[in-house]
Image (spheres, grey):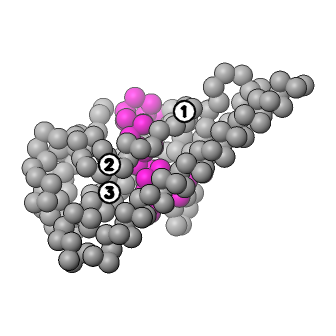
Amino acid sequence: MEFDYGEYFKELKNDPDKREVALRYERVFGSQENLTIEDQEFYKNYLSWFSFPFPIAIPKDCPNDYDWGLIIRFIFGSFSTDYAFILDEDWKKRPKGLPTIHLAINASTESKMLDELFDLQVLNILKTYLFEQMKISLVMEEEPDEYEDEEPNLKIGLVYQYDVYKYKKSLILKTIKSIRKENTVH
């Protein structure tokens, strides 16, 4: 099952709480018919920056149900949650081959491991982060006078999120290198 962006956008337009955002998004960015998430400016100009060189553990219940690279990019790029890379304990004991990285997603009220989520939780995360990116895009693209105080802060925020990601990525890569080196010495 692949996430259907067009169906999701129709769902937004029919949701009384989200309809206005969907209509504004369509007014600013044009018809969303026959488009994908990868066609969106927020993907091309932001989420596509994020890539990770090692496998990230995903739920065993729905391994082929989603574009995990996309979901992981949404997590990395989100303003509403934090995340942490956790190195697989088995790999730390026997560092052979590529390490598997677990991704802890930290929301304001709870922390969850990506690979422990159920199908419905994954779908809700995807929808939440997608809607978040749409709203950020609107703030940055709509009438500049109306958002002149917010727009620079959002642009700085995007760069900051990416810098945080690069920092966290560098830390886990150093840890992996150190474990490999330590294991080679023994």
Percent position of residue 90, x then y = 73, 31
Q: Are marks 2 and 1 in contact (CB under 8 Å)?
A: no
Q: In this view, does 26 lie above or below 144?
A: above
* Quadrant where the N terminus is found in the figure: top left
What residue lies at 33% left-to-right and 60% top-to-bottom? Answer: 132
* Amino acid type, residue under disc 1 in the picture: Pro
Task: Give the CA separation, mark 2 to mark 1.
Answer: 20 Å
Looking at the rendering, the stretch of residues picked out in magenta corresponds to 61-84
* Amino acid type, residue under disc 2 in the picture: Asn
Does residue 35 belong to the magenta stretch?
no
Image depth: mark 2 or mark 3 in front? 2
The residue that mark 1 highlights is: 53
**Residue 122 can be seen, yes or no:** no
What residue lies at 10% left-to-right and 52% top-to-bottom? Answer: 30
Horizontally, residue 56 falls left or right of residue 23, namely: right
Percent position of residue 63, x then y = 45, 30
Along the polypeptide, which appears first: circle 2 or circle 3? 2
Numbered tag placed on residue 45 in the rendering: 2
Percent position of residue 31, x then y = 9, 50
Q: Foreground residue, 51 or 130?
A: 51
Along the polypeptide, which appears first: circle 1 or circle 3? 1
